[in-house]
Image (cartoon, helix red, strand yellow):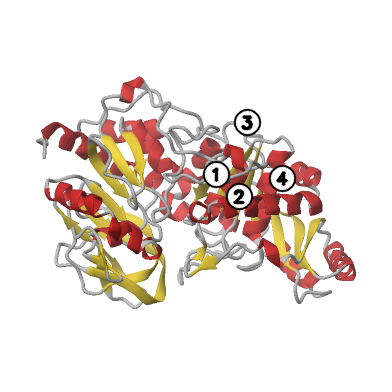
Amino acid sequence: MSVPAVVIAAPASGSGKTTLATGLIGALRRAGHRVAPFKVGPDYIDPGYHGLAAGRPGRNLDPVLCGPERVVPLYRHGSADCDIAVVEGVMGLFDGRINDNNADPIAEGSTAQIAAMLGAPVILVVDARGHSQSLAALLHGFATYDSGIRLGGVILNRVGSERHEQVLRAACARVGLPVLGALPRLAELAVPSRHLGLIPAVEHGSAAHSAVDAMTDLVAAHIDLPAVVALAGSRTSGPAWDPRAELREAAELGVVAGLTVVTQIGGTAESGTGVGSFVDIPEPSTGGDIAEAAPTNVTEGVSAERSDGPVIAVAGGAAFTFGYAEHRELLEAGGARVVVFDPARDELPTGTAGLVIPGGFPEEHAADLAANTPLLAAIADQASRGLPIHAECAGLLYLTRSLDGHRMAGVIEVDAEFGPRLTLGYRDAVALTDSPLWKAGERVRGHEFHRTRLATPPTTPAAWAWRAPSGETVREGATLHNVHASYLHTHPAGNPTAIARFVTAAKTFASTRTPA
């Protein structure tokens, strides 16, 4: 049976989707529902707040990075033990990857595409500031733009007064769209942001819990929850995504040699053990509706079958917060023992045979990272010995010689610095060299999202090449020894063979290395 869902969309960015979606997840959970939280696109930050509200990992649905064929299986996997799902959209309802040669009104990677794939109704969140009777014309356009998208209702956000709400409700009634709620303007709910958007929940600490509680209170007071539940629906079928099946297929095809797929993955989605993102959300000092069930990242619950598997250390803490739940699930399905550590204060975990350094904000924590000199030296030493390292974006910066003048690991002989502009967008890349994850010539879809830059190109072989919109060929990233470092974010669920290769490389390193 398909778990019913509502898709939270908007006419444009900045309309309040994250506040509404997070509060709705928390309010539904408070009302006794088991809520599966999802985010459309490659966003890492919003799912952190969703996870706090739901008490389970927030997940992404991205047909660009994972392939359209995996969207429904990933949805069924992430919602398997729930009774309702809330899917937060990206940008405007019909906004997605820009393709000048595609006249299809449903853009690739758009919220509309996900809603159509799931067969789920859309709730349109409208920023009411500046709107009056003309709202009816806007809603009429969104409701009739594509017959495959069902607009099920409207939520009015940032309403100025009772009279303002009356006028807007009349406009919605004029086009036959029910109003599911109206939220007043409350500036105190704003969550602090910086150059790449909201501050991740793990960095925001106790304030993140307070913000989620406030969002939950707001939605519970102003949204018709029974109407939302009655509206929810979906039309999906087929098997759920299974990390073991993905890795088994790679092994059976002979793409990955020597991989043993486990038959049981420890932990449950509800507890967060054995699955979920790589970073822990600090608990607040006092209790609350949301705080007590925040997802954790402990490794207890790992099956005995994996007790002899390679240790794969994953950088976490405040500096490295960008990760997908499916990454850990694939690593553990391949037999790895995942150990999360904080590079600002911890040592390299004992027995590390593979190192994952995900994205995040090392530029905000460069001084703390630089102060942990024993770890920097250990990583440089192990990299020279052939330790498999998978570093994305923040991970690339951490492996450089310096970041904004602060010493880093020095694995890659280049310096990094905060840049003048944001680099953002999907990339169709080809691997230029063999690495522990990819073979030269393999094609991958990835996503860039950063405002730092390398002062000079690395002298080591580049990891990727792609063609820029200008037609210029871009060579990016660095590879050396068993290190693959790049600004390009990839989704593990879309590249299970790469994860299988990485686990196999870790096994090989563990079996052949000699004590330091």
Residue that label 3 marks = 1
Crowd around label 4: few <14 · some 14–19 · many ≥20 (10 Å): many
In the current view of this chain or complex, which residue is farthest to the top? 304
In the rendering, which numbered label is found on residue 283?
A: 1
Kindly identify the amino acid type of the residue bearing the numbered disc 3: Met
Residue depicted at 20% across the width and 34% down the height: 507
Q: Nearer the viewer, mark 4 or mark 3?
A: 4
Q: Quadrant of the N terminus?
A: top right
Residue 61 x/y as whole percent: 51, 49
Q: Are marks 2 and 1 in contact (CB under 8 Å)?
A: yes
In the rendered image, is residue 148 in sight? no
Residue that label 4 marks = 27
Instruction: Tell me the quarter of the picture where residue 285 sits.
Output: top right
Residue that label 2 marks = 209
Rendered view: 250 above or below 482: above
Crowd around label 1: few <14 · some 14–19 · many ≥20 (10 Å): some
Q: Is residue 398 left or right of residue 329?
A: left
CA separation, marks 2 and 1?
A: 8 Å
Rendered view: 132 above or below 315: below
CA separation, marks 3 and 2?
A: 33 Å
Kindly identify the amino acid type of the residue bearing the numbered disc 1: Glu
Q: Nearer the viewer, mark 3 or mark 2?
A: 2
Between discs 3 and 2, the one toward the N terminus: 3
Residue depicted at 25% across the width and 31% down the height: 259
Rendered view: 14 above or below 513: below
Between discs 4 and 3, the one toward the N terminus: 3
CA separation, marks 1 and 4?
A: 20 Å
Q: Is residue 342 left or right of residue 18?
A: left
